[in-house]
Amino acid sequence: MKHFKFEEFRCRCCGGLPLLARANIESLVDNVLDPAREQFGGPVSVNSGYRCPKHNLEVGGVVNSQHIKGEAADITAGSPEENKRLAEILEQNGNYDQMIKYLNKDGGIRFIHVSWKRFGPNRKQRLISKI
Ligand SMILES: [Zn+2]
């Protein structure tokens, strides 16, 4: 946990971050987010980290969303161009279970969903979703 704080990953509705989710977030940061942030060289913010099941439903997350386990985060580096560079770094590093690029109507990357399973296996699955 070098470039990120647990506070950034708390549930947006209730501030929750259960112990198990906290351990998973720490693994996500150490293996995926911190190395990418280091290479990116600029600020990366967390739009959504851990979600309690209620909040996950409210924001339309899938029932088995990795956000509920603290295995996933939605991150942004700011502009679509910066997000593109951040996504390329994540892809090159190859450390992720699932990575979903959420695109604006014009094709720019609005944010990146990235997940990591602490005890594996990590699928290295890449998807694109249009908002
Ligand atoms: Zn909540």
Image: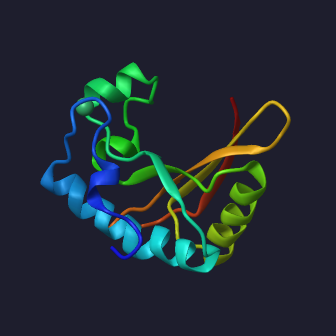
Q: Nearer the viewer, residue 1 or 60?
A: 1
Quadrant of the image containing the C terminus: top right
Residue displayed at 42% across by 67% down: 121
In the image: residue 28, left or right of residue 77:
left
Give the image location of residue 74, x and y in percent.
50, 47
Q: Nearer the viewer, residue 37 or 91?
A: 37
Q: Nearer the viewer, residue 96 or 112?
A: 112
Residue displayed at 38% across by 75% down: 30
Quarter holding residue 116: bottom left
Give the image location of residue 32, x and y in percent.
48, 70
Residue displayed at 38% across by 29% down: 63
Quadrant of the image containing the N terminus: bottom left
Residue displayed at 22% across by 63% down: 23
Quarter holding residue 51: top left
Can you say whether 13 is above or below 69 in the image?
A: above
In the image: residue 112, left or right of residue 54:
right
